Image (cartoon, helix red, strand yellow):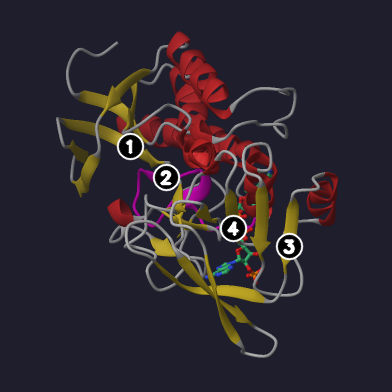
Amino acid sequence: MSTTNQHDLVIIGGGPAGYSAALYAARASLDTLVVEQGMPGGQIATSDMIDNYPGISLCSGSELGQKMQAHAESAGAQSAYGSVQSLVRHEGGFTIKTDLDSFEAKSVIVATGATPRPGNFSGEETFRGRGVSYCATCDGMFYRGKRVFIIGGGNSAVEEALYLSNLADRVEIIVRRDVFRAPRGMVDRLAMKPNITIRYQTSITEVSGATFIGAITFRDNATGEMHVESYDEGSVGIFVAVGQDPATRLVADLVEFGPDGGVLTDEHMGTKTPGLYCAGDVRSKSLRQVVTAAADGAIAATAAYQYIESISA
Ligand code: NAP
């Protein structure tokens, strides 16, 4: 193991893609460092339950994240904590600067994941943390016995609704079209919860209040009609679950992008910059899942190993 800040491979992001890459790279005897800014597991660290990773059932996201980290470290990978500020390609490789440290690497895998997309309604920023949230597992407990609205019609919105139905008195899902994007099997699970209702063809356009949310403006997307509902301040919450934006800031000048804003890679997770690979939700892809992120990580690490071998030969 290295005792300097020089590594064969630096992996930015400690989610399923990052730690899967770390496991494969360490097993291939690469000196491998994972740089993570928060909890191991990335986005799944805030997931109450993971039940679609093959062979794993009844496991929380944070537990699965910790297991992935421990597994990679048992194979020889190292972890460092810090928020990466810049990634620079130079003749000898890459420089990765965090808020605390600086690392050199022959090859880099960017596995920075994705961040929640905003709901784009008036007052969203003002009431963020005072009624507007992006994570039911993180903030759901503040709405015990209260009324919550969930914006979105994808898998995340359904999962957030099911989770919150065990805490809140009333859960209403605000779906902008007349159908969910989530598959029917997921949506059918909502019917088992009597305190969940769905408002189709509806958008939230504005929230207001003195300190907490006291009023919400709804638009009927079929007719364009608006109406305002008032509440006791502090008695309602809005959870925004409208998708993710790939976290690509570090690689803006080093890669090309797909239509969803994710990084375009080849089938080996390679980018237009030699030695730079991207894996997981940061990529342009159709299915953002733990299993696809882990697969990306394994492929990227194998390609990085071959790249490092080729430049060392
Ligand atoms: P998603 O699948 O992209 O769905 C986003 C939903 O939000 C869609 O219903 C979309 O409506 C709606 N939406 C987007 N912008 C909106 C806005 N400004 N106002 C109101 N509604 C808006 O996103 P996701 O649910 O976060 O899931 C992201 C990825 O993770 C997906 O690939 C998903 O399958 C995966 N995921 C999987 C699981 C699981 O399998 N257990 C759990 C969570 C996430 P339209 O349909 O009209 O565009």
Spatial distance from mark 3 to mark 2, Cα to Cα?
Answer: 41 Å
Q: Are marks 2 and 1 in contact (CB under 8 Å)?
A: yes
The residue that label 1 is drawn on is: 107
Q: Is 158 left or right of 232, judged from the image as shown?
A: right
The x and y percentages for residue 147 are: 59, 52
The x and y percentages for residue 8 are: 31, 27
The residue that label 4 is drawn on is: 149
Q: For the residue with label 1, is its CB less than 8 Å from the closest atom of ligand 1?
A: no
The x and y percentages for residue 305 are: 43, 30
Q: Are marks 3 and 4 in contact (CB under 8 Å)?
A: no
Point out the tag, 1 or 4, that comes first from the N-terminus: 1
Spatial distance from mark 4 to mark 2, Cα to Cα?
Answer: 39 Å
Residue lying at 44% horizontally and 18% vertically, measured from the top left: 26
Q: Is 133 left or right of 178, judged from the image as shown?
A: left
The residue that label 2 is drawn on is: 277
Point out the tag, 2 or 1, that comes first from the N-terminus: 1
Q: Is 60 left or right of 31, judged from the image as shown?
A: right
The x and y percentages for residue 214 are: 44, 63
Camera-side residue of 137 and 65: 137
Q: From what the image shows, is residue 270 above or below residue 152? A: above
Q: Which residues are magenta?
A: 271-286
Disc 1 marks a residue whose amino acid type is Ser
Q: Which mark is residue 125?
A: none
Disc 4 marks a residue whose amino acid type is Phe
Q: For the residue with label 4, is its CB less than 8 Å from the closest atom of ligand 1?
A: no
The residue that label 3 is drawn on is: 198
Is residue 228 covered in magenta?
A: no
